[in-house]
Image: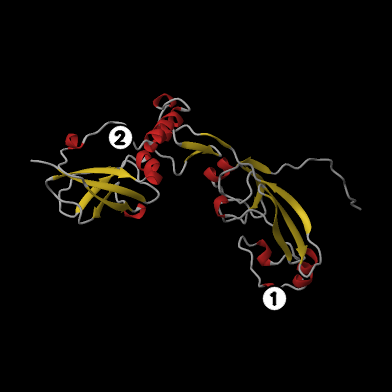
Amino acid sequence: MAGNKTLNARLSLKCDTYANWTSNNPVLLAGEAAVTVVPGETGAVQREPAVLVKFGDGTSHYNDLQFMSAKSADVYDWAMQAQKPTYQASEIQGLDDYISGQIKDTDTQYQLVRVSDTSFKLQSKEKNGDEWADVTTIEITYNLTEGETNGTVKFNGVDVAVHGLKSAAYQDTTAFDAAGSADAVQGNLDTHIQNKQNPHSVAADQIGAAKPGYVFYITLLASNWVDNSQTVSDIGFVTSGYAYLINPSDENFISWNDCIVRGKDVEQAGKMNFICEEQPSSDIVVKIVRMEVSA
């Protein structure tokens, strides 16, 4: 009676490179196994490199056979697709309960409170809450230094023009008189103004006057200056045969002198034009003495 016999052996399947299998492309016997290592970047399968097996059917060439594969009985077809299906939120059971447990809308309110000119604090509280709680303090720092360009200051690193500076702001200090010089000049002018005794000894014939002059007053309105000029009308202004002595009132002498106001020749009957180097900020009353002169 024949019995079972055990043979100790090692079985080796046909194994070759993927390049050799595909180039030789043999017809495999039915059930014959062909093992190969598919290297990376061949594009033969999705996951490379990989060790794969093909089984022959007795008629097909190697290149026409499929690699051995397995199917999982409990995996749906859509799970193995590259493009997964999409769902509406209403189709996902329990989604609302999950979100409500993860996200809490406290409806927090915020306000910014001024502490000082350069300090503020951010506060918060829940809607309908009673007290505000400090979140953080905000400090604002300003940096003001001398500007690089004359007539400017550097604010937080940027040159900013200073409004209202006139031409004097762009001059070196050597362009001006020493401190106190103006006070000395003003004192001399005040003394001269108060001297009513003809300190210059001016005679009537020196100005060509044949008889006492005709005196009248005009007012230079501060609002009438246009481009440092304004024209005043008065019947006392005659175009020929007269000279005019023009002096401001005592109260307006300083403004007249500081702004360097001057009257021009009468070129049109009834009118005299006045000019200045700087427009006065107030009205100036002017005394006009019209003196008859010989031809």
In the rendered image, which residue does mark 1 sit on? 90
| x, y percent for residue 88 | 66, 73
In the rendered image, which residue does mark 2 sit on? 198
Q: Is residue 49 left or right of residue 188?
A: right
Quadrant hosting residue 241 = top left
The kind of residue tagged 2 is: Asn
Indicate which disc, 1 or 2, sits on the residue closer to the N terminus: 1
Q: Is residue 161 left or right of residue 30?
A: left
| x, y percent for residue 64 | 55, 54
The residue located at (72%, 64%) in the rendering is: 109
Looking at the image, the residue that sits furthest to the left is 295
Camera-side residue: 74 or 31? 74
Camera-side residue: 200 or 24? 200
Q: Is residue 126 left or right of residue 242?
A: right
The crowd level at tag 2 (other Cα within 10 Å; few <14, some 14-19, many 20+) is few
Q: In front of the other: label 1 or label 2? A: 2
| x, y percent for residue 80 | 66, 61
The residue located at (79%, 71%) in the rendering is: 97
Residue 70 visible? The answer is no
Residue 271 visible? The answer is yes
The kind of residue tagged 1 is: Ser
The residue located at (35%, 55%) in the rendering is: 223
Q: CA distance from mark 1 to mark 2?
A: 109 Å
**Residues at discs 1 and 2 in contact (Cβ within 8 Å):** no
Q: Secondary structure at mark 1?
A: helix
| x, y percent for residue 261 | 31, 42
The crowd level at tag 1 (other Cα within 10 Å; few <14, some 14-19, many 20+) is few
Q: Secondary structure at mark 2?
A: loop
Query: Is 185 situated above or below 119?
Result: above
Quadrant hosting residue 95 = bottom right
Marking on residue 234: none
Camera-side residue: 236 or 274? 236
